[in-house]
Every structure is written in C-alpha cells, then in structure tokens.
Amino acid sequence: MALVEIRDVHKTFGKVEVLKGVSLDVEEGEIVTIIGRSGSGKSTLLRCINALESVDSGDIRVEGQKVHAGMPDLKKFRQRVGIVFQAFNLFPHLKVERNITLAPLLTGRIDKAKARALAEDVLTRVGLADKIDAWPEQLSGGQQQRVAIARCLAMSPHLMLFDEVTSALDPELVGEVLKVMEAMAKQGMTMILVTHEMGFARNVANRIVFMHQGRVWEQGPPAKLFANPETPELASFIASAK
Amino acid sequence: MNFLPLWRYQNQLIDGAIVTLELTVISALAGLLIGIAGAVVLKGRIVPLRFLVRFYIELFRNTPSLIQIFIVFFVLPSFGLKLPAFEAAAVALSLYFGAYSVEIIRAGLDSIPRSQVEAGQCLGLSGWQVFRHIILPPALRNAYPAVTSQFVLLLLGTSLASQVAADELFHVAGFIESRTYRSFEVYAVICAVYFAMAMSFKALFAVVGLAAFRWPRRR
C-alpha cells in the first residue's frame, strides 16, 4: 500500500475546475516532485493532501486514512503530515524556539522540560542552532524558511509537503534551503514537493510528476522525463524552464 | 483669580478623581471583554448572533452616551432593575466602550493573514489554540493604539455620569462651584486634573505597549 493514494480527485473554485481527475501514488521514502505551469493545480493538490482544501469528488488516503476537512482526527493527522509554505508563515510574535515548540507543547507531544532540547535538535538539523533566541523578523528569508522546516520536523512527521518553498527567496538564499531538503531526502523522509527548481528536481527526486491543466500529464524518473518527454506540453515546459 | 478657596475641597477633588478612575477602568475592562467576545462572534458563522452584535454596535455608536446612561439609570427601574448612579454609569459606559471595542478588535483580527491561521492548523492545533496563541497576540498589538485612544475618550466621557449624580470628578466640580462661585478656578483645576490623568494613561500605555509587544515589526 502506498503512503499516499490519490484517486480521481476533482476540485473546483467557483466556476474554475482546478483539478480534473488527478490520480497519484507516493510510496514511503519516495521523493516526488510536482512541476508544471502556474495554475496547473500543483499547490491545490498539496493543500488537498493536507485537508486545507476539501475535494469535490475522488479520494485521498494517507497511510490508509481517508483525508477530508471534516475527518474526526484531523488535528492528529496534521501532526503526521507537515507542510512548508512559500511565504514561511512563521509566527512573528514568537521567537524561533517558541515557533518550534508551540505545537509540540500544546498538543502534548513533549513537556516543557524537553522543549528547548527539541528546538536545539531540529535547528541543528537545519543549521540554525545559533538562532534559537532570535525573532523571525531578524532572520533572512532563507533562514526563516529553514526554521519553518525545523518547525515541521519538530512534529516528527511521516510525510512532508513543500509548496514552492524557494519561490519567495533571493537567488543566493535558495541553495541553503535546498541543501536542508536534500539532507532530509537522504534520511529517508517521504516528501512531495511543488517546485520550479528544475536542478533540484532532477538531482534529488525519485519521480517527477508534470501537471498540466489540472491533470497529471506525464510522470516518471527525472532522467527519462527530462531527456525524453513524451508530450509536447512537457517538452515545451522543460524548454521554457531552461 | 483666586484658587485658595478651593484648597479646603481637596479631599472631595481627590475622591472625585478616584471615582472617575474607577469608573473608567471598570468600564474599560468590561467593555474590552465585550469587545473581544463581540469580535469573535462577528468573525463566526452564527448569522443571528452576528446580526445581534451588529445591531448592538450600531445602536450604541449612533446614540448619545448621555441618553444611554439615562436609560440605564431612569428607565431600567421601570423593568425592575434599579441601579445606583455609579453602577448605572458603569453599565452604560461599558456597553458604549464595548461597541467601539468590538469594531477595533475585529479590525485587529482581520489584519492577521489567513496564512497564519493555516500554519497553525497545519501544526495540528485546535481552533481555540490557533486563536489564543497565533491570532490574538498580533491582533491585540494592531488594535492596541486604537483601544488606548478610545480609553482616553472614555476617561473624558465619564464626566457624563455627573448627570445622574455619580460622585465622579465633574460632579464634584459642580458641587464646589456652587459653594465657592469660583467657576473659572474650579473648572481650570478640573481641566488640569483630567489632562494630567489622560497624559499619565498615555505614558503608561506606551510603556505597557513596549513591554507587552516586544517582537519587531515587519519591515
């Protein structure tokens, strides 16, 4: 059984059908990168996997559990599925340590005595142990994004979703975030990424999924997809991304 | 100009100022609770409750505060609720302050981006935890300047309670003036006391604001 099973998912906003029957499986430990033009439904699909959006029809299951906004143990489910956003979304009124330990403390995963040690541990993993007492506003964009990743890691998720996490960063800050994600990939974390970083997708992902017009248009190993795209849409996308 | 005749009334003036402060603080605290509750209702999904809160806001923001005090003091006894002057003024001023606070706090809540709420939800927090730990602190910071301005207006507005003979500062001034016939001196002193209290509160709020909202503002 795949960790994530997506079957014929449809999603409409107003009169616009954003997802038109998406089906996709993600195995445990797999790194799947979703690429495609703006408006192809990539981010909406990620939001549906985390129940931030409800699907109109179709079925999403994570670890065998059907996902929808009204699921009874939604809070517990979200503790297992971390999501990192393009805009970091750190809490500006909380220092880095509190940003990381707020959810583990409030959900009872750890007690106060272990909170700082947990923050130090996950910050070390993203290379920011020295920023534990900083305010988010005192950090660069890349550092804020790494703290956002650390905040997710503190919940020990089984699956991580990344929604264009480098798109809002200056070019010189992109590398530091990708490095952290690469390290997570090596440690076996199951990851689904929406990204425009083609180099990262090519080097780190096990599989590339190309979405076009609300559908999974083409998918396969990065080497094959980049070298021999089967559809003119993917060929055109790869050419424009170069 | 002769201020000396007022000297013998210094105790009454101090008592009046204390009553004014009590009336202000009690009304502001109660009004603030009304404001937070009302703002939560306005952001909620229960339409009849939202309509009720909206009606309350419009009613109290579009009628004179003096009439609101009169209704609580003179009209409610007809329905079996008889309140002394201070309590009647406190109730009316709380409702008045609450009506403004609802809108101020609602605007503060609206100023928090939806993405912050989603970030909290995605970490597995409950609706209450997201509100209490993620939305409320920055919302209060954004609402704080307007709330403190409204507080000073409330402080000055407590003088209306003199019309139902609550023993606050302005009522005491009327009494002293009737005894001394020193209108200018009495009202000059009262003015200075109100001014001093208002400025003191502003300074206090500035210090409290710095201590309570220490995180740096977004660049």
Image: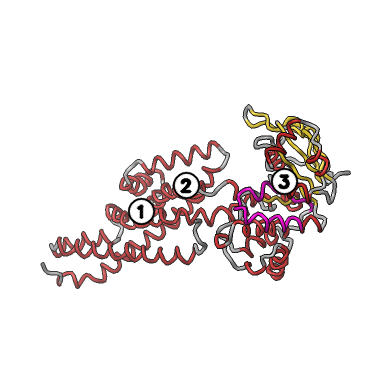
Q: Quadrant of residue A38?
A: top right
Q: Nearer the viewer, residue A102 or B79?
A: A102
The location of residue B54, given as percent across then percent down, is 46, 39
Q: Which mark is residue B147?
A: none
Q: Nearer the viewer, residue B112 or B176?
A: B112
Q: Residue at x 73, y 36 (%)?
A: A211
Residue A67 included in the magenta stretch of the image: no
The location of residue B75, given as percent across then percent down, is 35, 44
Task: Residue A24: tell me if it is visible.
Answer: no
Residue wearing tag 2: B107
> Tag 3's secondary structure?
helix
Q: Which mark is residue A198?
A: 3
Q: Residue at x 10, y 67 (%)?
A: B1
Query: Are circles 1 and 2 on residues that touch, CB within 8 Å?
Result: no
Tell me which amino acid carries mark 3.
Met
Q: Quadrant of residue A47?
A: top right
Q: CA distance from mark 1 to mark 2?
A: 27 Å
Q: CA distance from mark 3 to mark 1?
A: 68 Å
Residue wearing tag 1: B89
Tell me which amino acid carries mark 2.
Ala
> Magenta residues, as a range?
A158-182
The location of residue B84, given as percent across then percent down, is 36, 55
Tell me which amino acid carries mark 1.
Ala
Query: Are circles 3 and 1 on residues that touch, CB within 8 Å?
Result: no
Residue at the farthest left position: B1
Q: CA distance from mark 2 to mark 3?
A: 42 Å
For marks 1 and 2 on the same chain, the one whose residue lies earlier in the sequence:
1
Q: Classify residue B105 as left or right of residue A125.
A: left
